[in-house]
Image (cartoon, grey):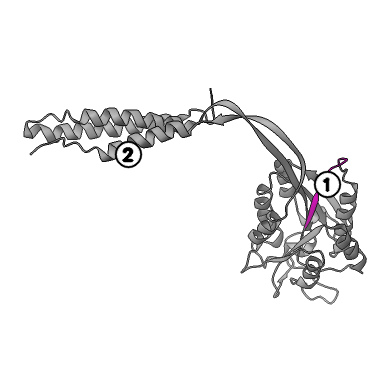
């Protein structure tokens, strides 16, 4: 016989707590019965009943498993590329503490929600690079995510095209198992939408033909915020000496999502739509890669649980007058 859950300190403490409480209940009943010249011995019937169903409940909680059953296991999944903008504008503080720090926290939660899928990380500004290739290892991806800073890429304006082109190149380079359907791919583009690149249309047409769905997350506010200097003293200024203000520009991000059958979401100082993004990604069905039959131990917790509930019902229905006036 095997156990679905090992006997731990929690179960032991629960049993000890039960015995202490019940011993206190018995002593209290005896103390109340003594002035009336009674001994409260009828309590023994209830004690025996409860000492039967409590261990049965504990046994059901541990999950006794014996025998094996054959169950089909379907392995499925999808590839999710995270494209994160690391341009200087992501240091703006209109989304506290900064746009990038807030994005890192939300992406960390998102990664934990997709344990059965492969995730990869691409960072970009004026150019793009693969920070972490597609992997099932969420802990490794978390390490890469934690290291993201705007100084990881060259100081240049945001260009969305290189990141999308790199994701397309990685998609075409992903090997496919002969006879199996192509894996479903989703792109999550996280940026403030300030695109200083040239023509995005050719890349957008190729992306639409690839079948990949793009979900864009606009980060920032329409009012915008000033950009701090890398050294931390003052704010960036343009050629005319005016402080640079970065604002959320959702137009390009919304268009990318619409033309790839995806969705556009926003992360602002008043609204966080990352949970909606997670739900949208969950609704994408991964393709079946393999169906196989495995032998698994049959958890027989139902039998001790049913017997314990029956004895519990008997305990409730069976009333015994312990102290007679």
Residue at x-position 66% and y-position 57%: 279
Apparent side of residue 203 relative to residue 105 in the rendered image (left or right)? right
Q: Report the magenta residues as a range.
A: 177-187
Q: Which residue is mark 1?
A: 181
Apparent side of residue 70 relative to residue 184 in the rendered image (left or right)? left
On screen, 89 above or below 111?
Answer: below
Residue 270: % across, % down: 61, 69
Question: At numbered mark 1, what does the secondary structure look like: helix, strand or loop?
Answer: loop
Apparent side of residue 170 relative to residue 305 in the rendered image (left or right)? right
Q: Which residue is mark 2?
A: 313
On screen, 224 above or below 4?
Answer: below
Residue 226 figure quarter: bottom right
Residue at x-position 16% and y-position 35%: 322
Residue at x-position 12% and y-position 34%: 33
The stretch drawn in magenta includes residue 178: yes
Residue 12: % across, % down: 42, 29
On the rendered image, what quadrant is the C terminus found in?
top left
Numbered marks: total: 2
Give how far apart the Cα atoms at labels 2 and 1 are. 54 Å
Categorize mark 2 by other alpha carbons within 10 Å: few (<14), some (14-19), many (20+): few
Decide which of 149, 229 is in the foreground and name it. Answer: 149
Decide which of 152, 191 is in the foreground and name it. Answer: 191
Residue 153: % across, % down: 84, 55
On screen, 170 above or below 208?
Answer: above
Toward the front, the furthest residue is 70
Question: At numbered mark 2, what does the secondary structure look like: helix, strand or loop?
Answer: helix
Precedes in sequence: disc 2 or disc 1 = 1
Residue at x-position 7% and y-position 34%: 35
Residue 199 figure quarter: bottom right
Apparent side of residue 189 relative to residue 221 in the rendered image (left or right)? right
Q: Is residue 317 visible?
A: yes
């Amino acid at each position: 016989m095997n156990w679905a859950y090992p006997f731990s300190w929690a179960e032991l403490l629960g049993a000890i707590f039960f015995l202490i409480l019940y011993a206190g209940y018995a002593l209290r009943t005896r103390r109340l019965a003594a002035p009336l010249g009674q001994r409260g011995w009828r309590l023994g019937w209830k004690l025996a009943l409860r000492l039967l169903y409590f261990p049965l409940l504990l046994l059901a909680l541990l999950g006794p498993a014996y025998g094996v059953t054959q169950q089909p296991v379907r392995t499925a999944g999808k590839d999710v590329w995270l494209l994160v903008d690391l341009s200087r504008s992501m240091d703006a503080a209109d989304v506290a503490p900064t746009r990038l720090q807030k994005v890192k926290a939300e992406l960390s939660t998102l990664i934990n929600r997709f344990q059965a899928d492969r995730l990869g990380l691409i960072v970009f500004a004026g150019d793009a690079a693969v920070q972490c290739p597609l992997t099932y290892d969420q802990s490794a991806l978390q390490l890469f995510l934690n290291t993201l800073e705007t100084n990881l890429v060259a100081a240049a304006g945001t260009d969305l095209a290189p990141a999308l082109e790199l994701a397309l190149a990685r998609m075409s380079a992903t090997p496919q198992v002969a006879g199996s359907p192509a894996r479903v791919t989703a792109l999550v583009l996280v940026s403030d939408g300030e695109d200083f690149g040239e023509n995005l249309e050719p890349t957008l047409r190729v992306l639409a033909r690839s079948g990949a769905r793009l979900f864009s997350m606009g980060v920032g506010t329409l009012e915008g915020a000033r950009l701090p200097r890398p050294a931390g003293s003052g704010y960036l200024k343009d050629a005319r000496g005016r402080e640079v203000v970065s604002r959320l520009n959702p137009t390009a991000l919304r268009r990318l999502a619409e033309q790839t059958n995806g969705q556009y979401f926003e992360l602002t100082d008043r609204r966080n739509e990352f949970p909606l993004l997670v739900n949208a990604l969950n609704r994408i069905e991964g393709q079946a890669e393999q169906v196989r039959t495995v032998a698994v131990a049959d958890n027989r917790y139902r039998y001790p649980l049913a017997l314990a509930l029956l004895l519990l019902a008997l305990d409730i229905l069976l009333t015994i007058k312990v102290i007679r006036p």
